[in-house]
Image (cartoon, rainbow, N blue to C red):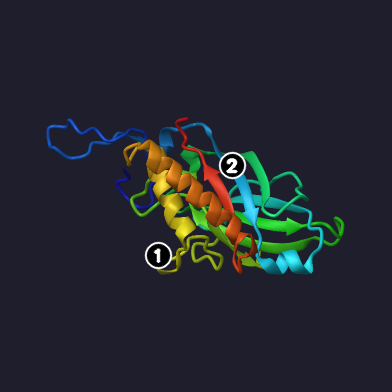
Amino acid sequence: MPSAPDEAQAGVTTGTADHSSCSGGKEFRFILSQDISLPLSFRVNRFVPDRTLLIERSAPVLFVECTLYIDGVQFGLSTNTRLKSLGSPYCWNELVTLSAKYRDLTPFSHLAFTVWDMSSGEDNIYIVGGTTISLFNSKNQLKTGRLRLRVWPNKMADGSLSTSTPGKVPKTKREEIERLERVANKYIRGQIPHIGWLDNLIANAADKLEKERIWSKVAYISPFILSGYI
């Protein structure tokens, strides 16, 4: 873990709990991000628009602009996904690899996603919305797995430290789908024991809720952040 907040040594969890430790508690192994020379990678899975976009724009042609910010300053060039015209939801499942490496990151690193509609041509691109997510949690551990980020309509993603487009939904406003996905991410990381019947129950419930939210009043985008040691 970092010895000081301004050092680029945010920890990346690489191990699972060891219940046989002498202390009787959970034991984890860590790799410092400064030691990982791999490029930062993530998947842009899907975008679920709000009902306004579906009603007002008959045939949107969308792409997602992905930008890395470090300490509130853009780092490197933005990367765009391919165009997508079939939805909703709009599914890319596209791997995005940035020029930045994990070792370049600081605890104050953010990913910014802006959704654009170019159905009216390249000279008249319409901003659908934007969202921003911090790459590290309060313990300076890299966030991994599938995330669900709120998209702020008609706004470009704001990568400043005091962002105006936060993707994280407050606990008091989380819907059932967010709670299910938090459980799913813990399951993927091995923090929850695998139980077959419970896994199927969670997956079926999540699919049902996803279909119900297609006509939601709030838009969401779902990136999947890859851990640097994979």
Circle nearer the N terminus (2, 1): 2
Say if 187 sits above or below 64 in the image: above
Location of residue 28 by image quarter: top left
Q: In this view, does 11 lie to the left or right of 101?
A: left
The answer to which image quadrant residue 57 occupies is: bottom right
In 3D space, how far apart are the residues under numbered discs 2 and 1 (Cα atoms)?
25 Å
Residue 142 visible in the shown view: no
Residue of label 2: 43
Badge 2 marks a residue whose secondary structure is: strand
State the SS at label 1. Answer: helix
Q: In this view, does 202 lie to the left or right of 15?
A: right
Residue 163 position, x and y percent, is 53, 65
Residue drawn at point x = 59 percent, y = 42 percent: 43
Question: Where's residue 224, x and y in %?
Answer: 54, 44
Q: In this view, does 119 lie above or below 97?
A: below
Disc 1 residue crowd, few under 14, some 14–19, many 20+, Cα 10 Å: few
| Residue to which mark 1 is pinned | 171
Residue 192 in view (yes/no): yes
